[in-house]
Amino acid sequence: MTSTSESGRKTLILTGASRGIGHATVKRFSSAGWRVITCSRHAFPEDCPWEAGPEDHIQVDLADAANVEEAIIEMKNRLDGGVLHALINNAGISPKDEDGGRLGILNSPHDLWLNVFQVNLFSTIQLAKGLSEALSRSRGSIVNVTSIAGSRVHPYAGSAYAASKAALASVTREMASDLGPLGIRVNAIAPGEIETPILSPGTVDMVEQLPLRRLGQPEEVARTIYFLCTDESSYVTGSEIHINGGQHV
């Protein structure tokens, strides 16, 4: 069973909360009474209607490994009683070329690969390691957000992004194995074409190729993430759940 903090509320730390899947996830967990600590490289916007405000927001640049370590210290300071119930590694970057096109093997510079892997992969390892003790206290959960691009060549996702997501799927299994004895479950979700403001031009044209003939909604992804962070999935770990309308079949 997942324990709660002294206040009776469960606590979630979420990266990449400002839009799309992250925003829907904040709404899903907060509606269930969770405290959601959001993380992004931007300061908390003054015009944001999120009632928790800056006291539950941490500014961190995931591309800077040293800054991630500093943020982990701040996260621990903000946790009630040092207990964390869930960590969701949702933040990710998928750079494009100057015209907004796909960056493949031949036109992706070395520095871009390093940056993408730090944000999409290495920072998730830092956070999982740094917060493992707080997660263990609650027998909590980690959910890593991978992608359908991690298992097949995608027309819009770049090579560095795809490779980082494939690596994150593998790291999810490694985390599940290493953290399982601490009582921590680790799973991944692999979204396909989800209707968000950052969809690449042309994505809508892919709908007729999907078995369900529609784009996914951020709320559908958020519900699966929520499932993986509750006792409803108490014996699920090391899994990657595809949320793509059958695109992978």
Image (cartoon, helix red, strand yellow):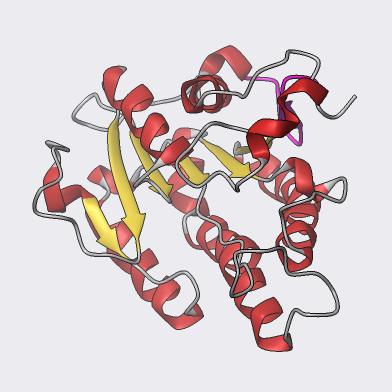
Residue at 38% over, 43% down: 19
Magenta stretch?
234-246
Image quarter of the C terminus: top right
Q: Can see residue 177?
A: no
Is residue 199 one of those drawn in magenta? no
Q: Is residue 67 left or right of residue 240?
A: left
Q: Give the residue displayed 28% in from the left and 65% down from the top.
A: 42
- Compared to residue 203, the image places residue 130 above or below, namely below
**Res. 199 visible in picture:** yes
Q: Give whichever of 107, 178 is nearer the camera.
A: 107
Q: Where residue 220 appears, x then y in whole percent?
A: 53, 20
From this view, report whether residue 14 is shown above or below residue 193: below
Residue 203: quadrant of the picture = top right
**Relative horizontal placement of residue 89, taking residue 77 as reference (left or right):** right
* Relative image position of residue 18 (x, y in whole percent): 34, 47
Q: Position of residue 120 (x, y in %)?
A: 61, 61
Front residue of 141/157: it is 157
Q: Residue at x 60, y 64 (%)?
A: 100
- Residue at image point 74% right, 28% down: 242
